[in-house]
Amino acid sequence: MQDILPEGGVVRKLWIGEAAKYRDHMLRLDPHSRHSRFGGGVSDDFVRDYVDLSLSVDAVVHGFFLGGAMRGAAELRPLGSGFPRQAEAAISVEKPWQSHGVGSALLRRTLLAARNRGYRLLHMACLAENRRMQQLARKFDAELSFDFGGVVGEVESSRATPLSLMREIMADHHGFATAMLDLQSRMLRA
Ligand SMILES: CC(C)(COP(=O)(O)OP(=O)(O)OC[C@H]1O[C@@H](n2cnc3c(N)ncnc32)[C@H](O)[C@@H]1OP(=O)(O)O)[C@@H](O)C(=O)NCCC(=O)NCCS
């Protein structure tokens, strides 16, 4: 399915060396979005430590990038060691880019990554009053089952297939090519 994103934006994996972009995105979240993302009010220092930890535990981070800045992020973190079958997912989109399809594109890509890594169960910590996240999750209820009765939503993802692996590889190639073009055009403008 084609993602509909704000013009000029792309969803791709975060690369090594882009930690600062992830941290800056998280720090730019408005207070309400930050509260929803972390399930409560947290300080800037907490956010910085959180990002450092995430990037040190094998998380797969997808970002929504526009003009070189990261404006949305989806994180997929394995739960447990060895070959974990469960993971945790969390999404954040900066306010001006909310309700433009970015969260949907990020969740779609995260579900594909979860499937290809063999995670059978995805936990999504979500406040019970977070209707928007629940609406977003419901869009995928053909391929997943969510239970938001409690605070944590659980998702059963389908098994990986050669086609699902190919979809992730192709998305990575596309993300790389688009980022290179974006960098080139910004260097030419400078
Ligand atoms: C929850 C969040 C990730 C959704 O991202 P988004 O980019 O706004 O999502 P989308 O634009 O793809 O919209 C997804 C669905 O949410 C619903 N939605 C969008 N805007 C909405 C609004 N203003 N009010 C209610 N529902 C809304 C719609 O059902 C929409 O699907 P549709 O456009 O096909 O009808 C984003 O609002 C956010 O970052 N919130 C703060 C952090 C957070 O709550 N994270 C979740 C905890 S893990």
Image (tube, grey):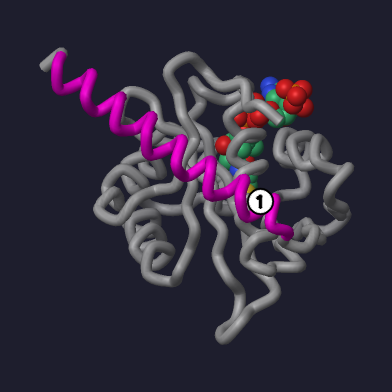
User: In the image shown, does 142 or 151 lie closer to the viewer?
Assistant: 142
Range covered by the magenta-colored residues: 161-188
User: In the image shown, does 18 or 51 lie closer to the viewer?
Assistant: 18
Say whether residue 182 is magenta. yes
Instruction: Give the residue drawn at x 84%, y 47%.
Output: 143
Q: Position of residue 142 (x, y in %)?
A: 88, 42
Q: Helix, strand or loop at disc 1?
A: helix
Instruction: Give the residue drawn at x 45%, y 69%.
Output: 58
Q: Position of residue 155 (x, y in %)?
A: 79, 58
In the rendered image, which quarter is residue 67 located in? top left
Residue position marked by numbered label 1 in the rendering:
112
Q: Is residue 131 visible?
A: yes
Say whether residue 141 is magenta. no
User: In the image shown, does 24 or 84 lie closer to the viewer?
Assistant: 84
State left or right for residue 175 relative to residue 148: left
State left or right for residue 92 relative to residue 176: right
Is ligand 1 closer than 8 angstroms to the Cβ of mark 1?
no
Q: Is the residue 114 above or below the residue 73 in the image?
A: below
